Image: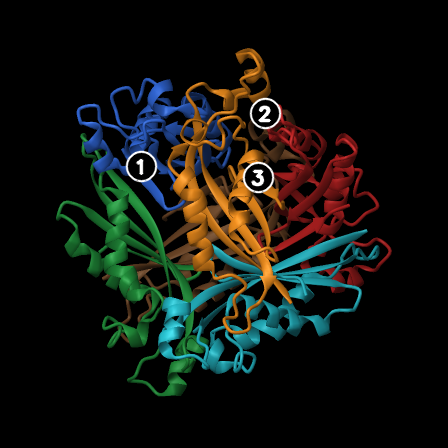
Chain colours: A brown, B green, C cyan, D blue, E orange, F red
């Protein structure tokens, strides 16, 4: 009897989409205003889904307070109120698109969850643009 | 050609997370303020998903008005404006966590749907805490 | 140059609408299922609005982090994960309707704000039922 | 490493549910007020999901600006501010239920996406009634 | 001690913006796709606000269940699942813009509320376009 | 017969709260992580309200398509996908708090509206922090 528990958190960050292997012109061609040299930013909404058996003693798959704490420690403490390009090591050599941020978040959380638990991540960059990663 | 139709409903209920096999101290340790002896409550938002073939005569998989009525009869009439611990038989011996409530809702609806139809349930306890159950 | 700053918080609570001066029958007649003897509950969403001059040194009317802390200390620490009828003194002799809860919240916050600041409170009991109080 | 990118768009349209093989009475019996001869309408919210590998040069699965443009060209330019029954060829012989509209949208988009990309469509007819189609 | 109680309801309707005193060309010039001869439609979200004294016996300004019933009887039964131009008398000689619909709703509700009660109406035509009328 | 028409738009921007008259330590003390030297960012949601008489020929107070265009030209073209501190002249000597951004937006829009029209601005920095300015 597998159930998925979901916790929604958010963080505010600046970022810029830029491929250093390309000219500035080509970056603007591909990324448009997202390549702006002085950055722009987003309220990222993050949904983390953990799938597993319900523990009969607690009725929990995974205590959502602990899931919230895990997300805070592993993700928000590093990304919230930061510049993803300049203030984190994750995006030193990786373009901080929503796709790549979701994969990084998944990779940061995965080692902290027991092997039988399933994990997936949804990241909203805006209300109209979002991505999902299931590992 | 399988399509999933989804209907969102809500109910307001009081509940308390408490395992009678444990001491009050251990309950508070595990469940925190959710163990409050006098209960607290939520606006539960419920999404019921039914998957099946589209009927060529109606263009419907399952008439959403009938789905709404089914949810009302089988779920809302029992859970809405109630105390889940005291006023229902479902949670006499089952802790009313979001996980367990979602499973009970799925079990209550399943017998009313024809066998070929798929069923899944999403239950929002708050905007930030929610669960999914696919049977 | 007056600006209004608004902070949204939430709390989860159980309550019951019941006038002890009336018979049970009359309570049910007036309050319907909201009079349920074992309580029901809500995710209350609270918006607190503070109006005042913008401080030229900070660009703030009132630091929203401090406003959040004030709401936590004066409101959430008392109401969140509680039974409003049983666990608070505010509603010992007052029916905890959305109207009365909003007035109590306003009265609890008012003494903590400097006299020139304006204060108003919006309280959502559900997404479709909400109240506003301006003092 | 497959990621799903999602783009939300909307269109406003009139429609009517009516099966010409049936009497007016039977249409009203099945479709209720949705059969109203003079039409009614909705703000349709559409989520298009595209699944594929992340391009290491761009960090994109599919540029969401291009996805937005594709949805505009193939869907919104035809459906937005239109009467689905009268102004489109898609629903000349097909009842414009949410199920059928979602399938048509999927069929209109599919040829414009490279074969390895996955495609699914969620269509909200109202906040409480929505459908999903995965092809 | 005046409090405002607010009730949110919705209705789905078709409409068309068209001034019969103008040529078709001028209508299209002014109203764009909203002038489409075959209509389009919306999920209208309606918020009705009633301001008054809190009754000490009930803790209510105005019972929101009764407010919901009043809105249903006076507004939804006439406008929901209808064509505003063709199926109502209100817009026989009045263009059904959001502005005019809000005024009509206010005028329909006003006679049913006691004189000391304040009334205002907010009408969302889409999530991004809405109007407010205070009488 | 005055009605208020409201248009919601959004822009994504980076910013930093920093008073150059203060030490870095005092900036961090006052602004916390919002003072981060490399900026952070937000999805700003902007609601512009225009109040006036309904034109009997159009049923409009102010054509919302034109209001949308005005907001685009005067606000979004300058603020969207920009760094408010570095890329705009408005915040060269003004801290880009939500309060100050709302006032600037109001001042930028006011000259473009006829004198009898009322104007107010609501700016959401996050879903939980927002400000209102009425001029």
Query: Is residue D72 something that shows in the picture?
Result: yes
Position of residue B68 in the picture relative to residue C92 (left or right): left
Residue A93, x across and y down, in percent: 55, 43
Position of residue F108 in the picture relative to residue F14 (left or right): right
- Disc 2 is placed on an element classified as helix
The chain containing the residue under callout 2 comes to: A
Image quarter where the N terminus of chain F lies is: top right
Q: Which residue is mark 2?
A: A29
Image quarter where the C terminus of chain F lies is: top right
Q: Are marks 3 and 2 on the same chain?
A: no
Give the residue furthest to the right: F21
Report crowding for label 3: few under 14, some 14 to 19, many 20 or more residues within 10 A (C-alpha): many
Seen in the picture, residue A56 relative to F78 is either above or below; the reply is below
The chain containing the residue under callout 1 comes to: D
Report crowding for label 2: few under 14, some 14 to 19, many 20 or more residues within 10 A (C-alpha): few
The chain containing the residue under callout 3 comes to: E
Q: Residue at 35% of width from left, 88% of height from top? A: B23
Q: Which mark is residue C47?
A: none
Query: Residue F43 lies in what quarter of the image?
Result: top right
Q: Which residue is mark 1?
A: D33
Seen in the picture, residue E20 relative to E96 is either above or below; the reply is above
Q: Residue at 28% of width from left, 62% of height from top? A: B77
Q: Are marks 1 and 3 on the same chain?
A: no
Q: Nearer the viewer, residue E122 or C71?
A: E122
Q: Which residue is mark 3?
A: E103
Q: Nearer the viewer, residue F36 or A126?
A: A126
Q: Are marks 3 and 2 in contact (CB under 8 Å)?
A: no
Residue A59, x across and y down, in percent: 31, 71
Q: Nearer the viewer, residue C23 or A129?
A: C23
Residue F86, x across and y down, in percent: 76, 41
- Disc 1 is placed on an element classified as helix
- Disc 3 is placed on an element classified as helix
């Amino acid at each position: 009897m597998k159930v998925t528990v979901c916790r929604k958190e958010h963080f505010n960050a600046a970022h810029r989409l830029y491929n250093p292997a390309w000219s500035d012109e080509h970056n603007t061609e591909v990324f448009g205003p997202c390549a702006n040299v002085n950055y722009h930013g987003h309220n990222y909404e993050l949904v983390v889904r953990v799938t597993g058996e319900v523990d009969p003693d607690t009725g929990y798959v995974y205590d959502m307070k602990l899931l919230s704490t895990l997300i805070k420690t592993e993700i928000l403490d590093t990304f919230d109120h930061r510049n993803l390009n300049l203030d984190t090591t994750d995006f030193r050599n990786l373009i901080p698109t929503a796709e790549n941020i979701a994969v990084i978040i998944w990779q940061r959380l995965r080692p902290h969850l027991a092997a039988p638990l399933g994990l997936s991540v949804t990241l909203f960059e805006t209300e109209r643009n979002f991505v999902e990663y299931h590992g």
